[in-house]
Amino acid sequence: MAALAADAVHPAAAAKPLSPARIKETAREFESVFLQGMLEEMFANVEEDGPFDGGEGSKIWRSLRTEEFARAIAHAGGIGLADHVERHMISLQETQS
């Protein structure tokens, strides 16, 4: 997935236009990464209890859970960031043609 974003800004990728589907997926993945960072900060001080409280396993579980939350939010429509990124990528691509 990260390769999608790298392709979008790499100079060699500018020569070959990206398909609308690839642009949409790249924008959605960008929003997902942004949301993951926001959610990680939001959950940073939340204490957990039960089988996943404390330890390294808890940190890994929290990271994976947060990543999936972010991905689900982005694929369900997100917060609108992907739409802005998609429009910007399309306009950049049009100006390079």
Image: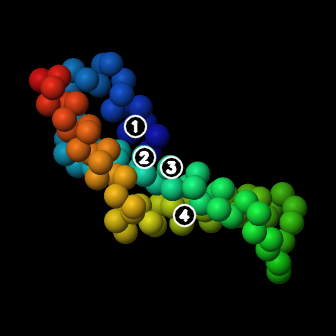
Marks 4,3: beta carbons within 8 A: no
Residue 17 showing in the rendered view: no
Residue 33's disc is 3
Helix, strand, or loop for circle 4?
Answer: helix
Q: Is residue 50 above or below residue 63?
A: below
Count residues near mark 1 (Cα–Cα under 10 Å), then give few for <14, some for 14-19, many for 20+: some
| Cα distance in 3D space between marks 1 and 3 | 11 Å
What type is the residue that disc 3 sits on? Val
Q: Is residue 64 above or below residue 76?
A: above
Q: Position of residue 15 (x, y in %)?
A: 21, 21
Marks 3,2: beta carbons within 8 A: yes
Count residues near mark 4 (Cα–Cα under 10 Å), then give few for <14, some for 14-19, many for 20+: some
What type is the residue that disc 2 sits on? Phe
> What residue sits right under mark 1 in the picture?
5
Marks 1,4: beta carbons within 8 A: no
Marks 1,2: beta carbons within 8 A: yes
Helix, strand, or loop for circle 2?
Answer: helix
| Cα distance in 3D space between marks 3 and 2 | 5 Å
> What residue sits right under mark 4 in the picture?
68
